[in-house]
Each structure stands twice: as C-alpha cells, then as structure tokens.
Image (spheres, rainbow, N blue to C red):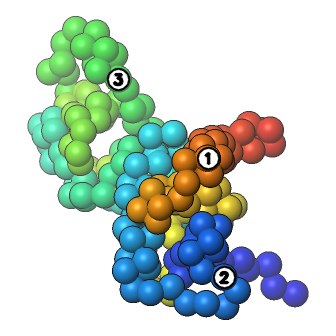
Amino acid sequence: MSTTFTRTREQLKQLVLKKLRVIAGTESANSADTDLVYEAIDIRLKTLHKHGIVWRKTTRTPVSFSLSASQAIASIGATDLLFPIQMTFLNVSIDDPVDLISVRQYASITDKTVTGNPTCALWLGSADFRFYPVPSVAGTVKLVYERIADDTSASAAPDIDQSMIRAMKDIIAYDVADPFGVPETRMARLEREALRGEIEPAASRAATGER
C-alpha cells in the first residue's frame, strides 16, 4: 500500500478553474488562462509566509559555512533564506549551540569585542549574521533555515505541504476571480473562503498541537 500523495501544479490549476466554472469535466484550459493561474500561484508562494511557519516550504535546508578567527560578521552565501531556525558552531568535534538573538538582545551586550567561541548570533537580514563572542579561532557554522518557497514547475507539486492544497485552491480561485469576470456576489463568497484558507493550516496545527 502506498501512502504517497502529490498534486501537481497542473492538477491545482484544473481545480481552480473548475471552481470558477471556467472549465468543466475533462476540458483543458487554454494557455492564457493557464499562465494566469500559474502566476497567481507563484505570487502566493512568495507571500504566504507572512502568516508564519504554518505555510512553510516542503523541506527545510541545512547549510555549513566557514568562520575565520576575528570574523564578527559572516554570510551563509545563500539567496533563499526566509528565516533562520537553528545554528551551531563546530568546536573541534562537538556542535555547540548558538542562540539566535534579537537586535535588542545584541544591543544589551556591553562589550561586543569579547573573543571566544560564538554563543549567539544576530541575523542581519539577507544572508548575514553577526557573532558574539567574536570567534578567537576559525571554525564551521551550521545553520538550518526556512527557505523562500520555490516557483512552480511543470509536473511538480507546489512548494507547500500537501495538506495545504485545498486551502491553496480556494486562495488562488479568489486571486484570479476578477480577471475571469466572476460576479460580485460570488466574489464575496470566494473572498471568505480564501481568508479561511489562509488561516486554515494554523488552525489545524493548533488543534493537533503540532508546531
């Protein structure tokens, strides 16, 4: 018995257009309608993280990068970092935890020139981090981070948890309803369903106690 469940962007597009009554049954969408839906999906994939980690990517990403002695600021060398999750500093053969702190916490450190093995790091945005204490020896930093969601690609599932597909369908249907000339009375219902879809993953995870 297989437990694998996937829905491609093509199947998601079909669900959206059927919900909007643009196509029916086994009809295929034309290229213009297809491009409109795919663009709406990609835009949402880049913005849904505003609701928090509940709209996370399918996978999280580990990365390692070198930290030289006396190097207070370092970059992970990636362009897809959404937010950091966990960091460690390799001390000989042991990964010591490095706390990810806020701007206010870093500002409260009196002497920021202290050297030693880093115990905390301030995310400066983009891919840069500031470490404290300033490393006294070279080492390796390991970081697990949430990536920015990837754009869709042909015959592949959208870059979200599969449990979110139904909610995504409702959201995208509302996003493209206006170009398809959906009447205002139906637009109001689609808006309600889309708003419910945006928070549905959060409500579901809260109910199960999942983080």
- Residue that appears at 23% across and 35% down: 124
Pair 3/1: label in front: 1
Where residue 45 sits, quadrant-wise, is bottom left
Crowding around mark 1 (Cα neighbors within 10 Å: few <14, some 14 to 19, many 20+) is few
> Would residue 69 appear left or right of 187 to someone viewing this image?
left
Residue 141 seen in render: yes
Image spot of residue 110 (x, y percent): 22, 8
Amino acid at circle 2: Ala
Count how many numbered circles sit on residues in the image: 3
Pair 1/2: label in front: 1
Amino acid at circle 1: Thr
Location of mark 2 (residue): 24
- Residue that appears at 19% across and 12% down: 111
Pair 3/2: label in front: 2
Image spot of residue 197 (x, y percent): 64, 48
The quadrant the C terminus occupies is top right
> Which of the two discs, 3 and 2, labels the residue nearer the N terminus?
2
**Could you give the CA–CA distance between mark 3 and mark 2, rounded to whole angstroms?**
52 Å
- Residue that appears at 33% across and 52% down: 81
Residue 92 seen in render: no
Image spot of residue 196 (x, y percent): 66, 43
> Which of the two discs, 3 and 1, labels the residue nearer the N terminus?
3
Location of mark 3 (residue): 102
Residue 185: mark in rendering: 1
**Could you give the CA–CA distance between mark 1 and mark 2, rounded to whole angstroms?**
21 Å
**Could you give the CA–CA distance between mark 3 and mark 1, rounded to whole angstroms?**
46 Å
Element marked by disc 3: loop
> Would residue 209 appear left or right of 50 to someone viewing this image?
right
Amino acid at circle 3: Ser
